[in-house]
Image (spheres, helix red, strand yellow):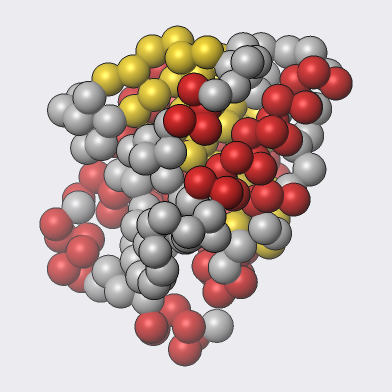
Amino acid sequence: MLNYLRRLRGKGIKARLLNPIDAFYDHIFGVNTFATKKYFGDLRESTWQSDYVPTSYKDIFILLKQARLDKSSVVIDFGCGLGRVSFAAAYLNARQSIGVEFDQGLFLAAESNKSKSKFKNKIVFVHQDASIFPIPNTASIFFFFNPFGFGTMSDVIKRIERSIQTSPRKIVIIYYNPLFQNVLKASTTLKLKHEWSAGKTQYPAQFWTN
């Protein structure tokens, strides 16, 4: 684990000095979510995997509040990395926050973070391919920071659609930096509720609901 964490970039003093808000929230949550990891592949391939770069806490708070997170919310973050969205959601008083991560090293690091966090009883991290992750029938907010390619995105959206058909409920999908928005546009169950261009947050964001 230690050797793996040493290979992750962006964990040092410089990253924290350049991102004081993120460093502040990491400190009060008792975690370390500073890291990046680069993957290689062709964006056109269905199995493409995005590089891991954590979303800023500032943007996460803006996005989750726009999704109307409250104490009944169950939040799922796909491609959760070291768990920053999950910790932020717990801080905002979500009932439960679930992070799904395919990379074993990132998952183990997220688990280590959870063990040190004051929110560990409200957070679950799952080491699994998102395309086969069973959607809980309580899940109400889904967070995507463009974590994977067209094929995996299609599989995950289909699973979300089946979940809300089986267990009818209102859900919100936050799609941050929506490179594969055509997957959602093709849905007959989901509709675009709201979107904004980069400026309010670092990247464009879309909010889909049923």
Q: Is residue 116 visible?
A: no
Residue 165: give x, y in percent of width and height.
80, 18
Q: Is residue 111 visible?
A: yes
Residue 32: give x, y in percent of width and height.
41, 62
Where 123 falls versus 43 (above or below)? above
Picture quarter with the C terminus: top right
Q: Quadrant of residue 201?
A: top left
Query: Which residue occupies the extreme right position in the image?
Result: 166
Left or right of residue 154: residue 59: left
Q: Quadrant of residue 157?
A: top right
Left or right of residue 125: residue 132: right
Residue under the point 37% across and 40% down: 179
Residue under the point 73% across and 48% down: 133
Residue 176: give x, y in percent of width and height.
38, 35
Where 198 falls versus 27 (above or below)? above
Residue 82: give x, y in percent of width and height.
49, 59
Q: Quadrant of residue 21?
A: top left
Picture quarter with the N terminus: bottom right
Where 177 falls versus 106 (above or below)? above
Q: Return the residue nearer the eye: 105 or 135.
A: 135
Query: Which residue occupies the extreme bottom position in the image?
Result: 3
Residue under the point 34% across and 28% down: 205
**Total marks in image:** 0
Q: Return the residue nearer the eye: 161 or 55.
A: 161
Q: Return the residue nearer the eye: 189 or 96.
A: 189
Residue under the point 45% across and 30% down: 182
Where 133 falls versus 67 (above or below)? below
Left or right of residue 130: residue 175: left
